[in-house]
């Protein structure tokens, strides 16, 4: 069963309809028709509701699924994993720790040694470009994003 949060009129006004449905009602946006599935700029992705730092561009990869996919969270304490038995499947739902926003799901088919794929809805994220991170209060992550992007030799 899909988790439905109590309605928050202020939040419903602040978010677009798809952002609200994804973050508050555990909906899923369409693949390949979302803001970040093919986004390749250096920076971080934060929870659109709370601003919690969630994922780095250097941990993003092209999964071919049509949603942004990451190998790990930027701040593991900001991401909560919850068993999800919706639609007769056994999955792991990914939620933000502070805002309890539905982000997406975690699958064991990613690249690298851990083999994880955090499949995340763009509608649950706000992107902070590297050159705006300090001004928006995310300076503590700048060195890590720069270092990781330099090691990857890429911007995502």
Image (cartoon, grey):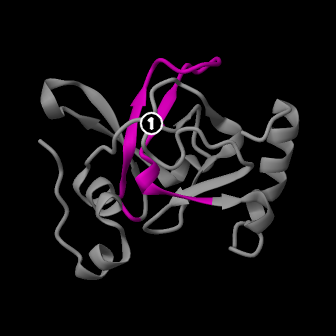
* Region of the chain picked out in magenta, as a range: 99-127
Task: Tell me which residue sits at (44%, 36%) in the image.
Answer: 32
- Residue 37 or residue 81, whichever sits in front: 37
Q: Is residue 23 above or below residue 150?
A: below
**Disc 1 packing (10 Å; few <14; some 14–19; many ≥20):** some
Nearest to the observer: residue 78 or residue 60: 60
Q: What x and y, as percent, mark residue 25?
A: 22, 55
Quadrant including the C terminus: top right
**Image x and y of residue 60, in percent:** 63, 36
At which x and y percent is residue 147? 86, 44
Left or right of residue 11: residue 114 = right
Residue drawn at point x = 11 percent, y = 41 percent: 1
Foreground of the two, 147 or 31: 31
| Image-based side of 67 in relation to 127, left or right | left
Q: What residue appears at the point 80 percent right and 40 percent down from the top-left corner?
A: 148
**What residue is at 29 percent from the left and 64 percent from the top?**
17
Residue receiving disc 1: 32
Would you say residue 109 sits in the magenta stretch? Answer: yes
Which residue appears farthest toward the bottom when viewing the image?
10
Q: Is residue 33 left or right of residue 84?
A: right
């Amino acid at each position: 069963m899909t988790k439905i949060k109590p309605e928050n009129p202020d939040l419903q006004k602040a978010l677009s309809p798809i952002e609200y449905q994804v973050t508050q009602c555990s909906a899923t946006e369409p693949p390949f028709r979302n803001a970040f599935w093919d986004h390749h700029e250096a920076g971080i992705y934060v929870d659109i509701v709370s601003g919690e730092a969630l994922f780095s561009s250097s941990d993003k990869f092209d999964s071919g699924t049509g949603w942004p996919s990451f190998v790990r969270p930027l701040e593991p304490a900001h991401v909560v994993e919850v068993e999800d038995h919706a639609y007769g499947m056994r999955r792991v739902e990914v939620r933000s720790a502070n805002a309890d926003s539905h982000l997406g799901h975690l699958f064991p088919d990613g690249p690298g040694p851990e083999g994880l794929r955090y499949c995340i809805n763009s509608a649950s994220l706000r992107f902070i470009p590297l050159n705006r991170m300090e001004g928006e209060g995310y300076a503590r992550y700048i060195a890590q994003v720069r270092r990781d992007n330099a090691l990857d030799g890429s911007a995502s």
